[in-house]
Amino acid sequence: MKTISIKNSNQQYTVGKIVCVGRNYAEHAKELGNEIPEKPVIFLKPASALIHSREKIIHPTFSKDMHHEVELVLLIGKTVKDANKNEAEDAIKGYGVGLDMTLRDIQNELRKKGNPWTIAKSFDTSAVVSDFVRKSDYSLTLDEEISLSVNGQVRQKEKLNKMLFHPAEIVEYISSLMTLEEGDLVYTGTPAGVGKVEVGDKLVGKIDGVGELEVVVGQ
Ligand code: ZN
């Protein structure tokens, strides 16, 4: 079982499911040649894919084009189903920074065939997370900057307020599709600047006020 930790606390949560949003920043949707969605694009990762900052991403041998996607991650603190916006906001317990590692070559093949993205998104080590900051300890304004650097070079950098769908709207929408439970994580989509990583690369993801993660890519 996978767990996540809360900053300045001994509290841990067992992770249930990981729900991800695709195409939540207009510039990122455009860079991959996608339309701007009317509703959030939703997919899942298994909890078994999760690793923490300072663990190692293992590059799958069946892909030649693994991409970084840095994202704000929401920690769900209570069970919600068909939540309204206030209930959705209330269900968000805390925030972390995450990487939704993606096999772009595999994803493009799957998209062409109209198949699910599962193989491109669900491999072991494909979901990286930092420790989480409780909402009661830090209130997110969305003026925060999210960034990712590879070997010290900034590749992704954007304000969280460029998200098309904001955290409570995302939780409200997901809860209309499936029950969210304590310990579930929601990856809220990546800004523009995604790109390939190689074995040996060092990735640092940050969100002002929320946290930081650091991982290397291994084989
Ligand atoms: Zn993503």
Image: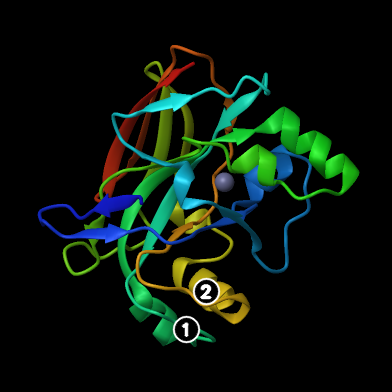
Q: Is residue 125 above or below residue 42?
A: above
Q: Nearer the viewer, residue 40 or 122?
A: 122
Q: The disc labelled 2 sits on which kind of residue?
A: Glu
Residue 112: image location, x then y, percent = 88, 41
Left or right, 141 with respect to 9, comes to right
Give the mark nearest the N terminus, 2 or 1: 1
Residue drawn at (34%, 80%) of the image? 90
Label pair 2/1, CB-CB below 8 angstroms: yes
Q: Which mark is residue 169?
A: 2
Residue 44 found in image quarter:
bottom right
Q: Nearer the viewer, residue 155 or 214?
A: 214
Q: Which mark is residue 85?
A: 1
Q: Nearer the viewer, residue 58 or 163?
A: 58
- The secondary element bearing badge 2 is classed as helix
Marks 2 and 1, how far apart in space? 6 Å
Residue 16 found in image quarter:
bottom left
Q: Is residue 131 above or below residue 185?
A: above
Residue drawn at (72%, 68%) of the image? 38
Residue drawn at (37%, 18%) of the image? 152
Residue drawn at (41%, 85%) of the image? 87
Residue at the extreme front: 1
